[in-house]
Image: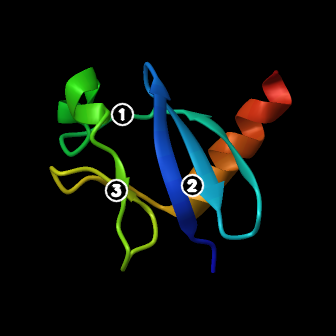
């Protein structure tokens, strides 16, 4: 099972994410903030409050939004291939 070790806000809707498999990379969530749970995160001040929940071992925000490590890894892999 994949987990997130750390996540850091970069700019815009981008995070630098470190996975427990030793990989790391930028993840751009610009086009992923859909639905009522993620709507508040369109405010950059809210989006910047990202952290890693020690129990869930994934990224979370104070409003309760979270994203699965597998989703973030797939998105990071896809986005890195487009560069």
Based on the displayed image, in which of its 4 quarters is residue 45 positioned?
A: top left
Sequence order check: which comes first, mark 2 or mark 1? 1
28 horizontally vs 52: left or right:
right
Alpha carbons under labels 2 and 3: distance apart: 11 Å
Q: Relative to 28, does residue 67 appear above or below in the rendering?
A: below
Q: How many marks?
A: 3
58 horizontally vs 3: left or right:
left
21 horizontally vs 50: left or right:
right
Sequence order check: which comes first, mark 1 or mark 3? 1
Alpha carbons under labels 1 and 3: distance apart: 11 Å
Q: Relative to 38, does residue 65 appear above or below in the rendering?
A: below
Residue at the (18%, 51%) spot, across then down: 62
Q: Nearer the viewer, residue 81 or 59?
A: 59
Sequence order check: which comes first, mark 2 or mark 3? 3
Residue contact between numbered discs 1 and 3, judged by CB atoms under 8 Å: no
Q: Nearer the viewer, residue 71 or 43?
A: 43
Where, quadrant-wise, is the C terminus in this rendering?
top right
Q: Relative to 8, does residue 81 appear above or below in the rendering?
A: above
Tell me the crowding category of disc 2: few under 14, some 14 to 19, or many 20 or more residues within 10 angstroms, Cα based: few
Residue at the (81%, 24%) spot, across then down: 82
Q: Which mark is residue 78?
A: none
Please state the horizontal and vertical placement of residue 54, each as a whole percent of the image. Answer: 38, 74
Where, quadrant-wise, is the N terminus in this rendering?
bottom right
- Residue corresponding to mark 1: 33
Alpha carbons under labels 2 and 1: distance apart: 13 Å
Please state the horizontal and vertical placement of residue 24, each as a whole percent of the image. Answer: 71, 50
- Residue corresponding to mark 2: 71
For label 1, the SS is loop
34 horizontally vs 26: left or right:
left
Q: Relative to 39, does residue 77 appear above or below in the rendering?
A: below
- Residue corresponding to mark 3: 66
Residue at the (55%, 65%) spot, across then down: 5
């Amino acid at each position: 099972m994949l987990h997130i070790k750390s996540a850091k806000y970069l700019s815009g809707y981008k995070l630098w994410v470190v996975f427990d498999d030793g990989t790391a990379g930028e993840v751009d969530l610009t086009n992923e903030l859909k639905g009522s749970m993620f709507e508040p995160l369109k405010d950059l001040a809210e989006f910047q409050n990202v952290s890693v929940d020690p129990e869930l071992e994934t990224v979370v925000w104070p409003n309760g939004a979270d994203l699965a490590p597998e989703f973030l890894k797939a998105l990071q892999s896809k986005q890195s291939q487009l560069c």
